[in-house]
Amino acid sequence: MNNSLHKTYATLISLLLVFLWSGNAQAHSLLSENLRNLATQARVLDGQIAQINLTADDTCGGIQAAHRSAVALIANLEAENAVLVPPITLDQNSLQALEDMSRTVTSMANRTTGLSVSLGLLDVTADKLLISSGMTAMLRLSDDIGVMADRILEMADKILVMADNIGIMADRIIQTQLIQSENLAQTQTFLLITQQNIIALVSPVNTSTYTLDINASTLAGNLLAGDISTTLLTPFNMANEWGALATDVDGLRTQVDTLYQTINTATDSNTTVIDPGSYTALADMSIMVSSISIAMQGLAIATEGLQSVTRDSTLDLSMDGVLQMSADIGVMADRILEMADLILAMADNIGLVADQIIATQQLQSTNYAATLLSIEATQTIAIGIIVANGL
């Protein structure tokens, strides 16, 4: 009777393990398939942008069609992002799809640079109203491409946070991160050139702002960067300190995200007038996020030095905080660029503040690149600790 009961339990446990493995394999296969489908959709949009031909009679028809396709792709990226749940088992196909998407978005950004040059060549001969419509459409499309790049990066970070096989895929993950960082840097460079080309075509008008809210978030972030820089880690407090800092960074990310949603809602139905002070405040905010990422990198290096005298369970919890913080910092960096692009796309007075806008964009682009480098370095340290300690 006892023997029979043992056999029954063994059979049930085996069936349960098979069921769990099967469910995990299906979820893993579905993620890989969804990412490949998104990569295909991105390639189709890239081809659509490549086919756009600007003429004196039609400066925005093709661009507006591409904008609609881009909005659909962004919605699909956000939908996939929303349903990601742990645990996620990474495979070569998923990582390859993420790489392909980031490369394709870089290609799109490069194509918009060419289109902005073409629009400039039409300026002398085309109707001014058509040129104005083309400029607005071009700025919206460049904003769409920037958002796509951001969403892909956010998805990659989220998948990394939820992955249960980082150790096995460590080398491939790091390679993917490097490729994505390079592609993002190129994408931002192309979009910056596109926007500068459009700004050069615009004539003056007048002024208004979100400076107060931006400054409040920047102040909170600078205080947080100071807290991170002065945090002293030990083998005993490490998990609590990383957890507390991750909570603080998440709160700041929510604050920045709320500001982004406010600006996004406002620009949906209104044009905006750029106040140089608000654009300067956005540049200060990008410096703040870069400072947080650099401070986090320093703390990750300190954690790396303590790993040999720290319990695995403490390291495991600490790495959860590190990866979550790096993902949230990436989101904040993305939102700041998106806010600047939204304001620029809907602005009535670009001509009056053109020099200020270009200087701010260049500064933001530099800060964004520095933030990505710090995040990448921090995640590489975290992956190294996970692998070395078999977490």
Image: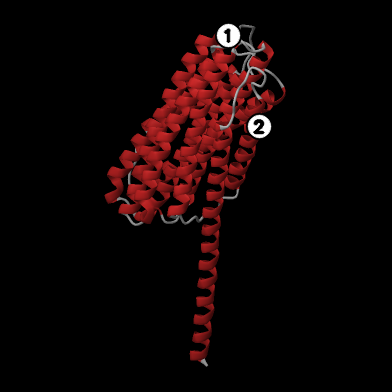
The reply, left or right, for residue 229 in relation to residue 288 is: left
Kindly identify the residue that appears in the image at 50 percent across and 77 percent down: 14
Q: Which mark is residue 351?
A: 1
Kindly identify the residue that appears in the image at 62 percent across and 27 percent down: 63
Picture coordinates of residue 157 (x, y %)? 47, 43
What colour scheme was applied to this rendering of the protein? secondary structure
Q: Quadrant of the C terminus?
A: bottom left
The reply, left or right, for residue 371 in relation to residue 250 is: left
Say if 330 sits above or below 272 in the image.
Answer: below
The amino acid type, in three-letter code, at marker 2 is Ala
Which of discs 1 and 2 lies nearer the camera? The answer is 2
Assign a secondary structure to mark 2. Answer: helix
Q: CA distance from mark 1 to mark 2?
A: 27 Å
Kindly identify the residue that appears in the image at 62 percent across and 45 percent down: 79
Residue 215 in view, yes or no: no
Closer to the camera in the image, 135 or 293: 135
Crowding at mark 1 (Cα within 10 Å: few <14, some 14-19, many 20+): some
Residue 83 in view, yes or no: yes
Picture coordinates of residue 355 (x, y %)? 50, 9
**Residue at numbered disc 2:** 65
Question: Which quarter of the figure has residue 374?
Answer: top left
Closer to the camera in the image, 295 or 78: 78
The amino acid type, in three-letter code, at marker 1 is Gly
The reply, left or right, for residue 369 in relation to residue 252 is: left
Say if 141 sits above or below 33 in the image.
Answer: above
Say if 161 sits above or below 153 in the image.
Answer: below
Closer to the camera in the image, 10 or 33: 33
Crowding at mark 2 (Cα within 10 Å: few <14, some 14-19, many 20+): some
